Image (spheres, grey):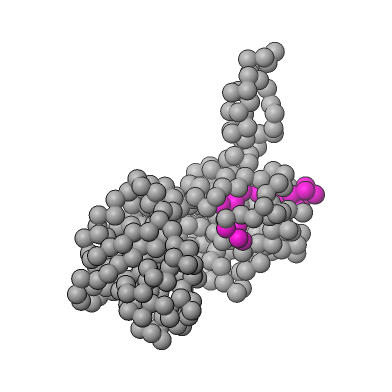
Amino acid sequence: MKQPRIAILDAYTTNPGDVSWEALEALGDVFIYERSSLTDIAPRIADIDIAVSNKIIWNKELLDKAPNLKMIALLSTGYNVVDLEETKARGIIVSNVPAYSTPDVAQHTFALLLELTTHVGAYAQSVRNGAWITSIDFTYQIAPLVALAHKTFGIIGMGSIGSSVARIARAFDMDVMFFSPHPKHRYERDRCHQVRLDTLLQHADIVSLHCPETTETRGLVNEEFIAKMKDGAYLLNTARGDLLDEHAVSQALRSGKLAGFGADVMSIEPMKADNPLRCAPNTVITPHIAWATKEARERLMSVVASNIASFIAGNPENIV
């Protein structure tokens, strides 16, 4: 293949400037755009061979504007932004980056849980505000502190991230239950068991979502799902925003059915001002950053460069 023309169309979220594009720049004529609006994108893809993107929606209309396009190298694991039927019909290769942020998302899952149960941020802010200076006692409480040891941690989706979360939960001396539509016997061990979904919801003190978004899982967490959960349980979502009904979760938080909710994803991103979870009580919400440690982004960019190099060499990898 001749020297390809490569366009990185939404570079900023993957690399705000702290990581080098050098490995990718060595592969062709590379054009880097921090962001691409709908009006920007057409001229940018008109004569490129390879598009590198994360959240660009590759539908028929957009693909029509890229007649020379031969490859879409995704800066992500998920590929729901691509119309795969259209790319397959046009002979366009689509690659992704599997499992690059597994330990980072697992880490963030517990960051959310620990903030909900120990309120470190709130306590630290109270100290900055002078509350400890004026306290008449050597300590004080502004929010209840909850121990994780001996609680039951329920995992929905026992893939690479779910299994990493399970290992961390067991390190906290927690019992682990997990639900998967397929047998996952290799993960069963002392205090870690596969169970039916209803059983998990009935017994879990924490329910954490780690399943993909599919037609079967979209809207999984609804009023009926929450009603089956243990009273006072915590709900965590570091998977996909559309896995849950945000209004139902908000109502459960306001009623006290849920003790707390931690999430790194929303159904619409960036979050809308009228999202019912924005001001719901006992929530910790972060702006889709679980994947974005510098180390994870370095791994991501390395695999993307490798995917493109393999494609150029005629042996494409990580095809979806």
Q: How many marks?
A: 0
In the displayed structure, would residue 79 be above or below residue 226?
below
Name the residue: 77% across, 54% down. 251
Quadrant including the C terminus: bottom left
Name the residue: 38% across, 59% down. 33
In the displayed structure, would residue 61 be above or below residue 179?
below
Where residue 79 sits in the image (x, y, percent)?
A: 46, 69
Q: Would residue 262 be counted in the magenta stretch?
A: yes
Where residue 295 sits in the image (x, y, percent)?
A: 36, 48
Classify residue 247 by image quadrant: bottom right
Residue 91 appears in the figure: yes
Name the residue: 66% across, 34% down. 145
Q: Residue furthest right?
A: 255
Is residue 10 found left or right of 307 in the rendered image? right
Where residue 53 sits in the image (x, y, percent)?
A: 40, 64
Classify residue 215 by image quadrant: bottom right
Where residue 233 sits in the image (x, y, percent)?
A: 69, 49
Is residue 232 found left or right of 303 in the rendered image? right
Residue 99 appears in the figure: no
Classify residue 173 by image quadrant: top right
Name the residue: 57% across, 72% down. 214
Q: Would residue 206 be counted in the magenta stretch?
A: no
Task: Name the foreground residue: 316 vs 32.
Answer: 32
Q: Which residues are magenta?
A: 252-269
Is residue 313 found left or right of 219 in the rendered image? left
In the displayed structure, would residue 235 be above or below residue 57?
above
Quadrant including the N terminus: bottom left
